[in-house]
Every structure is written in structure tokens, then in C-alpha cells.
């Protein structure tokens, strides 16, 4: 219950509508933007030159050939570069799962308080027992599995014999 409250309070520390982690990644990407060269087709496509590599950004399909945008849902440095080129705000292109309202929606149901087990009423129903253990299909292993510290002890024993 405390953790639940802490998670809701956590959003009060956010300085924007997207999570601090997503915001930091965007900030880092903004730093790099100045070093990249942009070619825009005056529609939705961009070519971003980064040294010897040229990446393609599509703002409608939400894709970049470096694939980080598709993978992470946060604009990569090439997408940030493309958006900056046309004066768009890159935080609007962050996927909804990093947004404050999505985060709060996940924590909108509260855990209801309950009394402890000794205060629960007695029942006349038969007690619930664990299910019977069934042998699993396949040949059973001939060797017993040893515990981690058990095998270590054996090594110690061997070493002492050799002395
Ligand atoms: Zn990319």
C-alpha cells in the first residue's frame, strides 16, 4: 500500500508530462543534433547524415533506419534532428507508455485494507490441500542434483587428498 502511494507521489517529481528517463534520453539526443546534416523531402521523409552513415526517418510510419525509435518508443537522435529541423517538439513523439497519464492509470486502483489472518472467521468447509505430485513425462534422472555448496565441499575434499 505504501509503495502504491510512493509511485503516485513519484509523478509529482516529474518536470514534464513524460517520464524522467524518457526526458533524459531526449535531452541527450538534443545535444547530438547539431553535429548531424539533414535532408528533408518537404513531406514526411528525412535523410540524416551521421559521418559515413545515412539514416532515413519517416514521421508518419514512426520509423528510423537505426531502429531505436521503433524499439524504444523514444525519438532517437536522428528523429530528434528531423523534428528540430521542421520546428516540431520531440516530446510529442514519445510513445504514450512514457506519459504521466498512462503511469497514473496503472496506479489508479487502490489496494483495499484488510484485517490479519487470526481475525478471519472460521469456515466449516474442508481445508484446501495442495495438488498431488504427478511424475513428469520422460526418463527420470539417475543422478541426484547436488546443492551448490555440496559440490564445492567435494572439491575441497579432493584437494586435501592430493596433499
Ligand atoms: Zn534512429
Image (tube, helix red, strand yellow):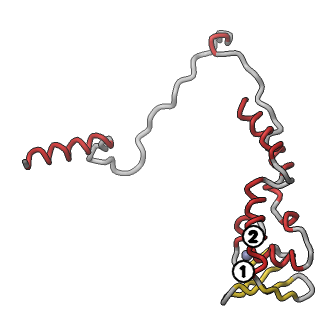
Residue lying at 42% horizontally and 45% vertically, measured from the top left:
136
Answer left or right for 152 relative to 59. left
Please name the residue that numbered disc 2 is placed on: 29
Secondary structure, mark 2, is: helix
The image quadrant of residue 108 is: top right
Looking at the image, do the residues carrying marks 1 and 2 touch, with CB atoms under 8 Å apart? Answer: no
Task: Check the picture and name the quadrant holding the N terminus.
Answer: top right
Q: Is residue 43 left or right of residue 39?
A: right
Which residue is rendered at x = 75% and y = 39% of the image?
7
Provide the residue designation for mark 1: 65
How far is mark 1 from mark 2, CA to CA? Answer: 16 Å
Q: Which x, y percent locates residue 100? A: 84, 50
Left or right: 40 with respect to 74? right
Label 1 secondary element: loop
Instruction: Reply above or below: 76 against 141.
Output: below
| Residue 65 or residue 77, whichever sits in front | 77
- Tag count in the figure? 2
**Ligand 1 contact, mark 1 (Cβ < 8 Å):** yes
Amino acid at each position: 500500500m505504501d509503495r502504491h502511494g510512493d509511485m503516485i507521489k513519484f509523478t509529482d517529481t516529474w518536470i514534464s508530462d513524460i517520464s524522467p528517463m524518457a526526458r533524459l534520453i531526449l535531452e541527450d539526443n538534443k545535444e547530438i543534433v547539431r553535429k548531424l546534416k539533414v535532408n528533408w523531402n518537404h513531406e514526411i521523409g528525412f535523410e540524416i547524415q551521421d559521418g559515413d552513415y545515412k539514416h532515413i526517418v519517416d514521421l508518419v510510419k514512426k520509423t528510423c533506419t537505426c531502429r531505436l525509435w521503433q524499439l524504444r518508443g523514444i525519438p532517437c537522435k536522428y528523429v530528434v534532428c528531423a523534428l528540430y529541423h521542421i520546428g516540431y517538439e520531440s516530446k510529442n513523439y514519445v510513445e504514450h507508455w512514457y506519459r504521466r497519464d498512462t503511469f497514473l492509470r496503472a496506479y489508479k486502483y487502490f489496494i483495499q485494507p484488510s484485517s490479519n489472518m487470526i481475525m478471519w472467521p472460521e469456515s466449516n468447509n474442508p481445508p484446501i490441500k495442495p495438488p498431488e505430485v504427478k511424475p513428469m513425462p520422460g526418463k527420470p534422472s539417475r543422478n541426484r542434483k547436488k546443492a551448490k555448496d555440496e559440490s564445492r565441499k567435494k572439491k575441497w575434499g579432493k584437494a586435501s587428498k592430493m596433499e
